[in-house]
Amino acid sequence: MTATIETSRELIGASTDDLADALAQRIELLDSQHLFDAYAAATARYWRRRAAAFEAARPARDGFHGRSAPAEVNARWERLTATARACRNRALYAEMYGPTESELALFVSVAAAIVAAA
C-alpha cells in the first residue's frame, strides 16, 4: 500500500512510487475538475440556447397573426418570455452551482462508461 502525499513537505524523502502515486492522484483530480467545469459550462450554454430559441419563437408584436385574437398573441408572447426567463435562470444556476444531483449522476455514469470502454 502506498502512502498518500498531502503536502509539499511530505515530498521530501518520499519514495519514487509514492511520488508517482501522488502525481497520478493530482492529475486525476485535475482531470475530473476540468470535466466537471466543462460540463457545467456546457449545461449553461445549453440553457442559454434554449432561452434564445423560446425568445425567437415569440410572435412579433406588430406582425400578422392570422385569426388569432390579440389576447391570444399576448398570452403566447408572455408564456414564451416566461419560459425563456426560466431557461436563463437555469443557466445562471448552472454557472453558479454546477449541475444538479441527477445531472451529475448521469455525467458520472457516462464518464465511467467512457473510462471502461477505453
Image (spheres, rainbow, N blue to C red):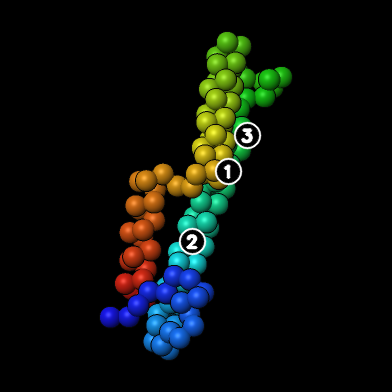
| Labelled disc at residue 56 | 3
**Residue at image coords 52%, 62%:** 34
Disc 1/disc 2 C-alpha distance (Å): 24 Å
Q: Amino acid at mark 3?
A: Ala
Q: Amino acid at mark 2?
A: Gln
Q: Quadrant of the C terminus?
A: bottom left
**Residue at image coords 35%, 77%:** 3
The relative height of residue 72 versus residue 31 in the rendered view (above or below) is above
Q: Residue furthest left?
A: 1
Q: In which quarter of the view is residue 58 placed?
A: top right
Q: Pointer 1: residues within 10 angstroms few (<14), some, or many (20+)?
A: some
**Residue at image coords 38%, 63%:** 111
| Labelled disc at residue 33 | 2
**Residue at image coords 52%, 31%:** 86
Determine which residue is flagged by label 1.
49
Would you say 54 lies left or right of 25 here? Answer: right
The relative height of residue 12 versus residue 96 in the rendered view (above or below) is below
Q: Position of residue 44 (x, y in %)?
A: 55, 46
SS at mark 2?
A: helix
Q: Position of residue 65 (x, y in %)?
A: 62, 20
Q: Nearer the viewer, mark 3 or mark 2?
A: 2
| Of the pair 77 and 19, the residue shown nearer to us | 19
Q: Amino acid at mark 1?
A: Arg
SS at mark 1?
A: helix
Indicate which disc, 3 or 2, sits on the residue closer to the N terminus. Answer: 2
Q: In which quarter of the view is residue 107 placed?
A: bottom left
Q: Quadrant of the N terminus?
A: bottom left
Would residue 50 be visible to someone looking at this image? Answer: no
| Of the pair 102 and 77, the residue shown nearer to us | 102
Q: Nearer the viewer, mark 1 or mark 2?
A: 2
SS at mark 3?
A: helix
